[in-house]
Amino acid sequence: MLLNQVFGLPFHQPEVDFLIPNLNEDLQLYVDPFLFYKSGNPEYQAVHSTIRQFFSIAIEQIRLGRNDVAQRMLHFPEVEETMLGVSSGTHKGRGMGDSRGKIIYREIISNPNILEYGVSHLAEMQLLIEGVGFDMVSDMCTNIAKPFFVDYTQRQCKMHNIPMVQGLSLGHVFDWEEHDWDDQHVELPVNPNTGYPILLVPKAVVRRFEDIDYKDFWNTTYRYILRDIEVEKSVRAIGREPKITWKEINEKYNFCKKTVVEVLHEQPELMKQYLQEKDRTTHETVVPVDLDSVEGTDITRNTAKEFKDELALIRPGNKDAKKYESLLLRILTTLFSPPLADPHSQVTTVDGREIIDITFYNSANHGFWNDIKTKHGSIIIVIELKNMEDLNNEEYFQISNRLNDKVGKFGILIARKKDKLDVQRAYRRFNQDQKVILTFTDEDIIQMLDNFQQGLNPSLYINQMYRKFVEEA
C-alpha cells in the first residue's frame, strides 16, 4: 500500500515533489548524491557539501591517529525509513553496517590520493571499492544527510496534511560535535506496518542507478584509452589501423568492476579526469526518474475534469482558504514540475514581516522559465493564493513587497476572478518597479489543465500571458 492510500490523502505522484513510498516493500530506487550536486538549488547543494565535510572530518581523524573515531563514523546501516533499495516484500535490507564500514576505512587509509585530496563525490567509493555499489552509496548519502531529509519530510507533511507523530526515535543521526552517531527524537509520520518513522525523498534526487559508476567510467573514459593502445600496437605491427570493436576490448581487458577498481588504484589521475569531465558535461537541471516504469510506484493521475470538479466544490472565502491552497499546490506541481520544484509554503521573508503562500525553486536551463530567471532574476518563483473574487490594491501591494533582487521580480497572483482594474494594478507595479505580476483566475487554471490533458506544455499559456502583459503594460 502506498502512503497516500494508507492515510486516505487526495494527492497522487504527479502532484507532489516527493517520491510516494510503498509502505509494504522497498521501491527499487536509490538516492544519488551526484543529483544533489548537479542541482542548482542551494539547499540541495548544501547536502553535497555536508557529505564532503563529513569525509573531511573522517580523514582528519585518521591523520590525527584517532582511528577508532574514524571507524565509528564510517558505519552506515540501511536507512529503512526511506523504503528505497533492493529488498523484496520487506523493508529489511542488508545496509552497509560494520563490515562495509571497515572496507571503506581500509580503502581510505591505504589510498594516498584520498588522504591527500579527500572525497569529491560520494560515488567515487563504488569506483574504488569492489564491494560497494549504488545501493550502498545511497545508504551512505542518506545516513549523513538525515537532518535534511527530516526537515524536507516535515515541510512536505505540513503542506499535504500528512499526519505526524511527535517524539519518534530516529536512529543513526550524526552528531557533528561528538563525531559519532546518536538517536534523535523528532516529529515524523509513522509507517503503521513497521512502526518506523517515514522519511520522504525528493523525486529529483532518486535514480535507478548512480550517474557515476564503474560502467559509466569504462564506457565514457577507459575503453577509449584501451582502444587507442590496441590501435597503436597494430599500427606498429602491421602498418595500418585495424577495426576494433567494443566487444573485443571488453573481452580482452576483462570488463568488470574488479578491473575498474584495480585500474583506478594504479592510475588515480584517471579518476580526476573522469570526474572533471562529469562536472563539465552535466547540466544544472535535474530530471527526475520516470516513475511510471518503476514497479510499485503510484501511477494514478487526476484528469483535468477531476481537478476542475474539485476546484468547483471550493467556495470563495476564508472558510475554504486552506482547501484552496492545498488544491492549487497539487495542480501547480502537476503542471510545472519539473522545472519548478521543491515547493515551500507559508515562507517567512528575511525580515520576518511577510509570509509568502508558495515558492518554487526554478531549476530551468531553457525555455520560458529560464527566460524568467534570466530577465527577472527569478531563481525563486513567488506565488500568492487568494480564495476571493474581488481583488484590491492590498493584494498587489503584498505580492509586490515579496518580490525583490534576492528572489526575483516575477510573481504570480492566483484568485477566483479578476477584472480590468486588477490588470491595471499589476501594470502599475511593472511601470513603477519593473515587477511582473501575472494574475491567474479559475478560468486560467482550467484552461491550463485542459491544455495539459491534451498534451500541451502549460508553460506556453503562461508565456502568452507574460508577453501580453509586457507589451500592454
Image (tube, grey):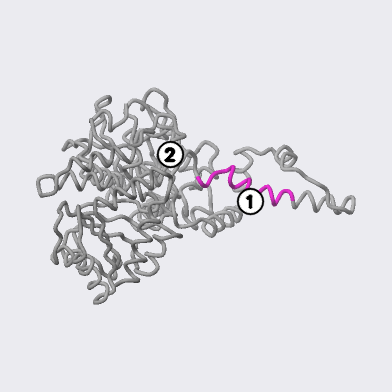
Describe residue 228's horizontal placement relative to residue 169 as left or right: right
| Three-letter amino acid code at the position of disc 2 | Tyr
Q: Residue under label 1, please give it.
A: 221
- Residue 26 at x, y = what percent? 38, 30
Which stretch appears magenta? 211-227
- Nearer to us in this view, 425 or 10: 425
Up/down of 50 relative to 289, above or below: below
| Quarter in which the N terminus is drawn | top left
Amino acid of disc 1: Thr
Q: Residues within 10 Å of mark 2 (few under 14, many from 20)?
A: many
Magenta residue check for 226: yes
Q: Is residue 240 above or below residue 466?
A: above
Give the residue at mark 2.
30
Q: Residues within 10 Å of mark 1 (few under 14, many from 20)?
A: some
Name the one closer to the observer, 270 or 386: 386
Q: Name the side, left or right, on which 139 lies relative to 112.
A: left
Q: Give the x, y percent position of residue 393.
A: 14, 67
